[in-house]
Image: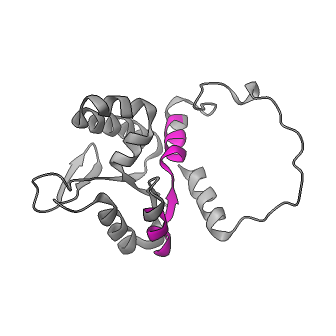
Amino acid sequence: MAVHLIIDGYNLIRRSSSLSSIDERSLEDGRKALMELLHDYRKIRGHKITVVFDGKHSYNLGREKERINGMDVLYSKRGEEADTVIAELARKMGTGVTIVTSDNGLLARIRAHGSVGVTSGEFEFKLREALYGDKYDEYGRDEEDYPQKGRKKGLSRRPSKKEKLKKARLKKL
């Protein structure tokens, strides 16, 4: 089953240290940098990607849609938040989509429709791992560089169905 990602564009940009520094200079440059990263990621993984940007402060009276490098890009209309558009898409598509956002309110809404939510940080890690190799982490160190922690103490807890589904989707990213 192919993965369809719906990404909260500005949320991902502003949660990423590298993209947020570009975004501070120019919104347009931040969007372009994100789209270039996603284009490279899409070439490697082949996932269908839809990016939704907030247009609530724009002059657009209706939603705008464009196609960039094989990805759908949606802009919400004036006065409408990207969260509304994403929740609507999640409701229409149901269990077949993975939503990328760190907005807890939106994550709760999309889970009610059966969609899987992944935080922006988790997705950025997977994106950079795909682009820069399996051993990538946010510090650029190999897994072997980490000190081994002691044995876990206490009872183990079984993951819920939602946690298992999220973990399975993260493996596919």
Q: Could you say which is closer to the camera, residue 26 or residue 111? A: 26
Instruction: Please name the residue shown 56% across and 57% down the image.
Output: 169
How many numbered discs? 0
Q: Give the dominant element type of the magenta stretch: helix, strand or loop.
A: helix
Q: Could you say which is closer to the camera, residue 130 or residue 19? A: 19
Q: Position of residue 24 (x, y in %)?
A: 30, 32
Q: Could you say which is closer to the camera, residue 162 or residue 24? A: 24
Instruction: Please name the residue shown 21% across and 53% down the image.
Output: 55
Instruction: Please name the residue shown 53% across and 49% down the image.
Output: 173
Instruction: Please name the residue shown 83% across and 33% down the image.
Output: 148
Q: Position of residue 73 (x, y in %)?
A: 26, 51
Quadrant in which residue 133 is drawn = top right
- What stretch of residues is rendered in magenta? 106-128
Question: In this picture, is 88 found above or below 60?
Answer: below
Q: How is the image coloured?
A: one colour
Q: Position of residue 2 (x, y in %)?
A: 47, 58
Q: Is residue 108 magenta?
A: yes
Q: Position of residue 98 (x, y in %)?
A: 47, 60
Whether residue 34 sits left or right of residue 44 in the image: it is left
Quadrant in which residue 164 is drawn = bottom right
Q: Is residue 133 magenta?
A: no
